[in-house]
Amino acid sequence: MTIQEFNNCVDTYSDGVYRFIVKNIGHEADAQDIVQTAFEKLWIHREKVESEKVKSYLFTVAYHQMIDHIRKDKKRATTDNFEDLKVHSHIASNAELKQILLRAINELNPTQKSLVLLKDYEGYSYQEIGEIMNLSESQVKVYLHRARLILKGKLIHLEKMSA
């Protein structure tokens, strides 16, 4: 990989990797560090990474860095974000609904949250997600289905409470 090819990879993939990480951990500076580390590892291993696998490599490295970060940062629990939710008698706007959905997503465990974000927000295929998260395609489908059922249950519960 040449410097120009590496720079093209940075231009092409950095925003997507950053969005994925920041949506998972919710902290911009840490997300920037994780993305930078992923690109640093790509540069170090540039001779070994095939050009058609660069995107998968970057997301895989960033995902594993994110998991390490979450494990090190035990103080930050994803379930805390949902406790602040105040249910109103009526959901007044799409912005409120989006915020409720994001809070419900933040309550998922890190694997479920990553699956939902990769599939539904970033639009990756089951195969690509499997490569990124080191899961089989069928595991991705099952885990994603379970995560969506949890989200559905939370949203139905909130809807009943607001009715």
Image (cartoon, rainbow, N blue to C red):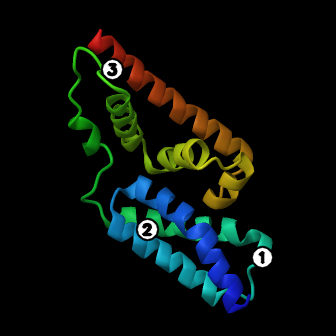
Look at 67% across and 91% down and name the residue there. 3
For label 3, the residue is 158
Residue sitting at 62 percent across and 87 percent down? 43
> Mark on residue 24?
none
* Mark 1, other Cα within 10 Å: few <14 / some 14–19 / many ≥20: some
Pick the residue in front: 85 or 133.
85
Amino acid marked by disc 3: Leu
- In x, y percent, where is residue 126? 70, 46
Q: Name the image quarter holding residue 120.
A: top right
Q: Is disc 2 in contact with disc 1, using a CB cutoff of under 8 Å?
A: no
Say above or below: 38 vs 134: below
Q: Residue at x 49, y 79 (%)?
A: 37
Tag 1 near tag 3, CB within 8 Å: no
Q: Earlier in the sequence, mark 3 or mark 2?
A: 2
Amino acid marked by disc 2: Asp
- In the picture, residue 107 is in which quadrant? top left
Which residue is labeled 1 in the image?
A: 51
Residue 106 sits in quarter: top left
Number of residues whose C-alpha sits closer than 10 Å to that of mark 3, classed few (under 14), some (14–19) or many (20 or more):
some
Label for residue 68?
A: 2
Circle 2 or circle 1, nearest the eye: 1
